[in-house]
Image (cartoon, coloured by chain):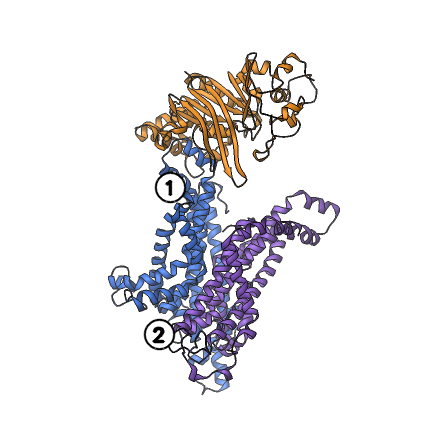
Chain colours: A blue, B orange, C purple
Amino acid sequence: MAFVAFLIKRLLQAVLVMFVISLIGFSIQDNLGDPLRELVGQSVSEAQREAMRDELGLNDPFLVQYGRFLGKAVQGDLGRSYFFKRPVLDVIGDKFPATADLVLGATLIIVLVSVPLGCWCAIRPRHWLSRIAMGASIIGISIPVFLTAIFLIYLFSVNLGWLASFGRGEHLVEIAPGWTTGFLTLDGLSHLILPSIALSSIMMPLFIRLIRSEMMEILEQDYIKFAWAKGLAARRVWFLHAFKNTLLPVITVGGVQIGTMLAYTILTESVFQWPGLGFMFIEAVTRVDTPLIIGYIIVVGLIFVVTNTVVDLIYTMVNPTVRLMGAAR
Amino acid sequence: MPLLDVRDLRVEFPTRHGVLTALHDVSFSVDKGERLGIVGESGAGKSVAAFAILNLLSRPGRITGGRILFEDRDLATLSRADMRAIRGDRISMIFQDPMMTLNPVLTIGTQMVETLKAHRDISDAEARRIAIQRLGEVKIPSPEKRMASYPHELSGGMRQRVVIAIALLTEPALIIADEPTTALDVTIQAEIMSLMLDLCRTHGVGLILITHDLAVVSQVTQRVVVLYAGRVVESGQTARVVQNPVHPYTRGLLSALPGEGEPGARLNQIRGSMPPLTAIPPGCAFHPRCDYAEERCRVGVPPLDVIEDHNVRCTRARELIRGVAA
Amino acid sequence: MSRLSAVLGSDFVYRFRRDPIAIVAFAVTAAFMLAALLAPVLSPMNPHDPAQLDIMNSEIPPVWQSGGDPAFLLGTDDQGRDMLSAILYGLRISITIGIFAVMVQMALGIVIGLMSGYLGGKVDAFFMRLADIQLAMSTLMLAIVALAVFKAAFGAELFSDMAIIMLVLVIGIAEWPQYARTIRASVLAERKKEYVDAARVIGLSAPTIMRRHILPNTLSPLLVISTVQVANAIISEAALSFLGLGMPVTMPSLGSLISAGFAYIFSGSWWITTIPSIVLIVLILSINLLGDWLRDVLNPRLYKG
């Protein structure tokens, strides 16, 4: 029962945050650009404009207009893109799979590298590999993601010519209607590798250091000493007793980092001209395509809220001490 | 042939401030089924001795001398795999704080079954059966249900019972209990202690009880070792040492107990406190706190001598027995 | 204050002198700071002055390459701008934005953190929840969105003129939770101590207690965070400029220099983007190494996560 209460509380919070984001989105729309400019040319008289304003409800009180905006948004209507001349959600839907590919690729790389390396650095802090990993991680933190991207392009595309430097490639596989992925073809993968590495490079050092420091702290705990005293195999002590406890803080931080990762997709996609949401957003900013800008903000806000809520729920499910108390941390 | 024979054990911690010696040539032994108390203030090296036996010293501590003979093998030189086979099987350990000893994210059942399976080639079902039986022995109500519980769902006393049950799982020859009741409520300390005593008796298990409490030692153990600043200062049969303490430190510990001396009289405290490892005074380490200290106590560590019926490390031991010293 | 100066006097300096990485990191950081400060003196030309540009001098390689010109040690960009001058001025702008943004963060963070920790209750709950949400949203994302909206609203022209102020404010406001949480944690820890109770009993007011007792004890965590945050702010500025949401090409920071040069990487004029990149990386790496070293030495209570 406590869990259900927690769930409801968490969902209410998510709705509240979405409400605030939509309010911000709407006030941007309200202040940015004149919708009439898009609908009619300059040749329309001021009286006619005023009549159209009334008709479109642009002269209604702020709250009424916001209510209308919210009502439409809930039904999936975020207006039409000035540039693409199509509904905003359709444009976003088109671009979303590319970003999803990129984020998935980067996440895979981060998890596959940082978990084993972080654990190793904690278990054998004086080993040469640990020293190299720690040294590399501080260099990694110090290189902005767009420079990593440029460097990767310069090395692997311009100099060596091994991998593609821009776009998603020609051969993508449609796994659902309107949803393509580059994971299933060689061409798709060759385009995916560099952007994924670039995007993962910014999170990697952070996760290696986080996993290392959390695990080192946990290895000093009494229950780990007790596990050794019980005569358990080293593998079981490290990868069950210590790692399961390490996972809790890593999940919390990891959840927060999903948001950061989305921000970095903007940079990565710009360098690689990756046809995803981030690249679309930067182009929309240059074109002052207000509905698309707002659409992006709302969709990204939704992604943040959903992932954070899911992470919180996973956390409560993994951590037995939280589950029983039911309340938030 | 004792079950465990620790001879001249020396443990050192190399640090930035030089090498610190936590244990100076400490010797003691435990016979089969015998109960030994190791007594001293915190920092005396009691826990270091316990962890050294199991080769679980935390970094950078290491054994630099002596032997730890257990069932004809020297634990100090054993390979990692052989040592692991002994830990939790032939020698179990009970930690001080039951709140910290059990892994918070694993169920009681998991933490019990894994111990058995690490040492016995048995099925999960068989391991569970033994685990439930042990939980019953430590008087945990509805043990089957408790197997699925997480540690935080149990009280401190209950958790220490679980730890005791884990220690008994494999029918070890020796249990090392490091201040097993200190972290518990005063009301249940005696209960847990007598439970442990009963179980050691019925299973014929040897016990090393590490504590700062001489009263408990006199009730539970047959022999006692008093440690001060990493050295044995007095050791022997518990009854003899308690009735006839010689070393001023042991005397101080005893007179600090409630119930000694006149009713209503103030409890005696040993003045000062144990020096840290970085600042052990020369000579007898206890001399700055000792009421009987003389000039000669400041130079040269006194040897551990057999005085009357037990061992004492004090330059003035013979005078103290005769009551000459003031 | 006495605690910090005691540390500065003894162990701190001793450990610094024994750590070659710390010495090099400090020397490099200091050299960059000095170069930024003296940029107008050191630079052969003023890169912000279009009158000094000569398109005839465009894309000259650095002096050690064939075709290099001793007048332009690090070559020129596509508009004939001397790269050495551009980098020195860019460094100046990047470091200025980094430091001022961190000052904004610190000011906000200290005020909110002190209030949160000292007043507790609803004030605390509100700010900490806000910090949670803001961190979850990612500070870079907030900065990008805010600047994008400003740019769309004001137009590129006005945006260029106000870029420095906008960047300082946006990066400053986006990162306050770091400081606020640390200060709050320190306040909560200090509040438990007896001398704060004693001060309250004597009748000192809350602001006095905070100023005299609590803030001095937060100095070492503040120092560690600030070092790392300056590096982060410089990276953020570079990223925003790279996206065209930061400094304009007419008044470039290191980030906008890299961004402007990116187009020439394929045509062979590698130096336009590479040299500012190296400067940026070395600068940030030095500051980060210094921050790491400070954290090891001062070992303050930092808010985790």
Q: Quadrant of residue B310?
A: top right
What subunit carries mark 2?
A: C
- In percent of width and height, residue C170 lies at 53, 66
- In percent of width and height, residue C241 lies at 47, 70
Q: Nearer the viewer, residue C258 or C24?
A: C24
Point 52% across, 81% down: residue: C49
Badge nearest the viewer, 1 or 2: 2
Q: Is residue A287 left or right of residue A165?
A: right
Q: Is residue A1 visible?
A: no
Q: Which residue is labeled 1 in the image?
A: A239
Q: Is residue B68 above or below residue B58?
A: above
Contact between marks 1 and 2 (CB within 8 A): the answer is no
What subunit carries mark 1?
A: A
Marks 1, 2 in one chain: no
- In percent of width and height, residue A159 lies at 31, 68
The amino acid type of the residue labelled 1 equals Phe
Which of the labelled discs sits on residue C268, or is there none?
Answer: 2
The amino acid type of the residue labelled 2 equals Gly
Measure how far apart labels 1 and 2 are at the Cα level.
50 Å
Q: Quadrant of residue B65?
A: top left
Q: Is residue C279 visible?
A: yes
Is label 2 in a helix, a strand or a loop? loop
Q: Nearer the viewer, residue B138 or B302?
A: B302
Crowding at label 1, few (<14), some or many (≥20) Cα neighbours within 10 Å? few
Q: Is residue C187 left or right of residue A69?
A: right
Q: Is residue C117 above or below residue B98?
A: below
- In percent of width and height, residue A193 lies at 31, 61
Point 35% across, 55% down: residue: A109
